[in-house]
Amino acid sequence: MQATIIRSNMLTLDDRLERCDAALTIAGQIQMVGTFENLLALAPSASVLDKRDFHLTPGLTDAHIHLVGYGLSLSSINLEGTRSSGEAVLRVAARLAEFKDGWVLGRGFNLGAWNDAAHPTAAMLDAVAPHQPVALRSRDGHSLWVNSPVLELAGVTADTPDPAGGVIVRDERGHPTGTLLENAMALVTRVQPTVGLEDAVNAGRLAAAQMRRYGFTAVHTMALEPNLYLQAVQELEARGELNLRVWACIPHADLESIEALGLRGGLGDKVKLSGVKFFADGALGSRTALMFEAYNGYPNEYGVAVDSPATVLERGRRALELGFSPVIHAIGDCANSQMLDVLAQLAPIAQRRGLRLRLEHAQHLTLPDLKRFAALGIVVSAQPIQLPGDTATIDALLGEARAARSYAFRDLLNSGATLALGSDAPVATPDPVLGFEAAVQRLGADSQPWHSEQAITRLETLRGYTTGPALAAGWESWYGRIAPGCAADFTLWDGDPLLEGSKPLEALSL
């Protein structure tokens, strides 16, 4: 097998050798690291890839993404940055001028950033789309805004009960207004045009290509997607077209099917089925994140509980016995506290099985809970890229005291917790340049520092995109470092990644 020596300015993130200028690779694995002269003397027939004008780090990993959903989002209406429902409606109207048939889909509006913070209504969309179905998903993915044709197609009326773990927003007479929260969104998604396998394959291919351009070599894809989307990623691998490593989750509702098929966690080559996804609550922007105290200005709203602690405990135990890591979405402080209690009970099983426990988001925490992650060995899978868009919403809905414990990266690291960083794309862009800025600078939407005492360094952020996700996936022995025995997956940078202004250029795999 052909050996390759890659020559560059390398930041290894390996404790044994912080920096080096060359790595010897064979068949996709790093064999040795050190000086170029020494490696060339040991392998004189090796080919040489000269990247001395650049810097190299271990390949970046996005620890929380919806890969196929991100690919599909690249062709839908982008509502990011809208400041009101009226501005969002104008974007819908512009799209309708181009596409006069079929469903109109979009995503990205942030209710907390609008100057009209009430839930938007079907009537607003009916003004520009009285006949064509329109469905718009919020930035956080936990609410859906639709027009009257969609409500009619879905059969959602005043007589439709709220589903478990979901809310149909209603007017004073009990009629649906056009916003559906959490599990109520399924009332609409079940009647939307289905995405075929080839559509999903194409979207997955598009997303993977974009992630490579951003410098990512691996992703952890979550389960808030149809099972067809996971099938599409596996199909890309089967066709030899997948250029990312994928740590994949399944919804906990599929546990029985997985068990019946005899499948176990960790199976697969590039696509590894490894996580089982749960949802403790919703999201802050939709006022469905489960909080101990009511939202400011909404005295009767505490959020929405989705999967109960009892459900997560019972099914999480089953997942662990099958070799899958429980992966729990928890945003509100109450949801996080409840799930930490559950994970404390699951920790002995996870330790026995050699599996990681992780909470996704962990955005809002109480002071006592901040210190529990490290003690329990729970990885915090966080998304700093969402911070700039959330600051105004947090300030308005939670107030100063609770805001100080939001996106509390510094406190978590100081307590000994591990951070695995990602984007939650398509909720936010996976662009790592913006992810680094959000973690290090902590600027709000107004470009002013926001609780900068919780900022982390560029090195800590880089670890959050490399060694942290590797640990979260159980890959720490062979991924996330430039070291012998690790995968030859790298990210090429235009300058020293620890210096402000440097950025990833592309992913590189040998």
Image (tube, helix red, strand yellow):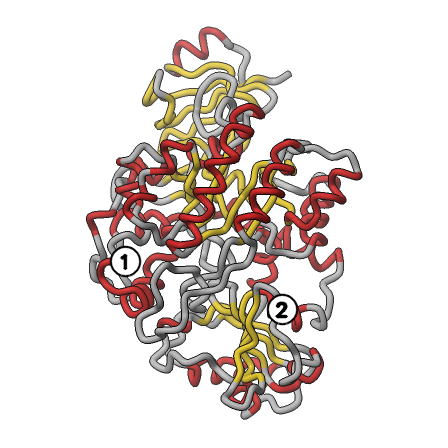
> Residue 361, percent across and down?
43, 50
Residue at left 37%, top 71%?
112
Q: Is disc 2 surrounded by few (<14), some (14 to 19) or many (20+) residues within 10 Å? A: some
Residue 198 to residue 244: above or below: below
Q: Amino acid at mark 1?
A: Arg
For label 2, the SS is loop
At which x and y percent is residue 161?
A: 64, 76
Q: Secondary structure at mark 1?
A: helix
Mark 1 neighbour density, 10 Å: few (under 14) some (14–19) many (20 or more): some
The label on residue 163 is: 2
Name the foreground residue: 349 vs 481: 349
Q: Residue furthest front?
A: 310
Query: Which disc, if any, is residue 243?
Result: none
What is the C-alpha distance between the residues marked 2 and 1? 30 Å
Does residue 471 show up? yes
Give whichever of discs 2 and 1 has the lower sequence position.
2
Q: Depth check: 34 or 353 in front?
A: 353
Query: Residue 461 location in percent, x, y?
Result: 34, 40
Q: Work out whether 490 lies above or below 456.
A: above
The residue depicted at 47 percent of the width and 84 percent of the height is 90
The residue at the point 35 percent across, 72 percent down is 113
Mark yes or no: residue 271 visible: no
Q: Is residue 369 left or right of residue 506?
A: left
Q: How many marks?
A: 2
Query: Quadrant of the image for the C terminus?
Result: top right
Q: Is residue 276 above or below residue 123?
A: above
What amino acid is at disc 2?
Pro
Q: Is residue 157 left or right of residue 145?
A: right
Q: Position of residue 491 (x, y in %)?
A: 44, 36
Q: Nearer the viewer, residue 114 or 492?
A: 114
Q: Which-is-in-front pick, marks 2 and 1?
A: 2
| Residue 402: numbered disc | 1
